[in-house]
Image (cartoon, rainbow, N blue to C red):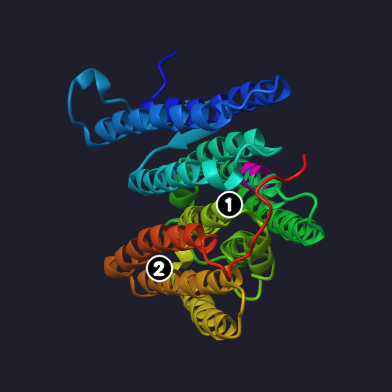
Amino acid sequence: MTLPPFVWLILWLILSAPFVYLIGRIDVMTGGRRNLARWLSLLCIGVAWYAFGRVAIAFYGLGDTALVERATWTLGAVTMRFDGLSLLLAALVLTLTTAILLYSGPYIGRGAGAEKHFALLLLLCGVIIGLGSAGDLFNLWLWFEAMAITSYPLVVFYTHDRTSLEAGIKYLVQSSTGSVFILLGIALVLLTTGTLDILEVRAALAGGTVSGLWVLAGILFVIGFGVKIALVPLHTWLPDAHAQAPSGISAILSAVVIEAGLIALLRALSALAGASVTWGALLISFGLFNMVLGNLLALRQKQVKRLLAFSSIAHVGYMILGLGIALYVGTEAGAQAGFFYLVSHGLMEGLAFLAAAALPSGPQHPLAAPA
């Protein structure tokens, strides 16, 4: 069976993570001081960049015709589609993961649990690219759940710290609650259309009158994905998780995980395009709330990472506002502005969190955490 290049990219990142952990664990148990997990993770991300180059070439149809693969892959009821939004998210997560892996070497050191840190970063990177390529709603939910499960051990990396455990529990409970809302929305879509493929759902609902079930499903999607995006008032997990996690994990949570949740929400709402004006008005409202509350709460923060966390909430508002205007007015300029802000926020906020640990006023954790 011939797989498209983007599927190979996802599989490589997901399957390489266990090997990085096992080899790193063996290195630690045998008393090795070579930090093999870090070097292997850098090697794996280098191969992933090569695979991403092939994906980009295939996507734009350049080079040898044998390299140009279909952008859609189906296995039974599972559908994966790679488009421009998938390419954007993949480039962002690979860039930030590479920076975090380079940064985490001296920050995490050779302390207990370092091999887990590097392996989970690779796994999270692959899961996020898979989420950006999901072509049906249930598959989208599965990738979304995998992202939450993978990021949870990273949030509670400092298991000796009670505040880290508290932040992790809050993150887990709220993420699980949001997932239930998403699943209920998916059930309503299946009940209405008889299919979960995003393109087929959109075609089935095109031209029809706006149904109350559609609107209810969309509201459930906004609430469920809104937890991960940190829409106000669903944002309460984010400041604690960002403040207590290692700086590299705070960077990927703010710069990529939030954006991945936003893209997942757009995928889900795009299937219900018949009520785009309704979703546009709803997103504009959430955007305004996030902008105002995020900036106001950031003003009173004394800890650097908590300040950046509330700043992320405000930045999400700017992204949501642009995308909401695009849906409400029907103009591409709003969507272009929203996606441009998504990339600029991802790079800026991610690097800001990496720099925060170098500040004397920033949160200082021991470099070695007990397993």
Q: Where is residue 366 in the image (x, y as percent from the top left)?
A: 69, 52
Vertical relation: 178 (above or below) 111: below
Place of residue 177 in the rendered image (x, y in percent of width and height, measured from the top left): 74, 58
Dominant SS type (magenta): helix
**Residue 171's image quarter?**
bottom right
Residue drawn at 61 percent across, 80 percent down:
301
Residue contact between numbered discs 1 and 2, judged by CB atoms under 8 Å: no
Nearer to us: label 1 or label 2: 1
Q: Is residue 293 left or right of residue 346?
A: right
Q: Tell me which segment is drawn in magenta.
A: 146-150
Tag 1: residue type?
A: Ile
Q: Is residue 314 left or right of residue 91?
A: right
* Kind of residue at disc 2: Leu
Badge 1, how many Cα within 10 Å: few under 14, some, many 20+? many
Q: Please state which of residues 172 and 100 is positioned toward the viewer in this rendering.
A: 100
- In percent of width and height, residue 248 lies at 55, 51
Disc sitting over residue 249 in the figure = 1
Mark 2: secondary structure: helix
Q: Which corner quadrant holds the C terminus?
A: top right
- Could you say which disc has been placed on residue 323 in the image? 2
First along the sequence among labels 1 and 2: 1
Relative to 191, 161 lies left or right: right
Give the Cα separation between the discs numbered 1 and 2.
Answer: 27 Å
Q: Is residue 98 left or right of residue 111?
A: left
Q: Residue at x 55, y 85 (%)?
A: 299
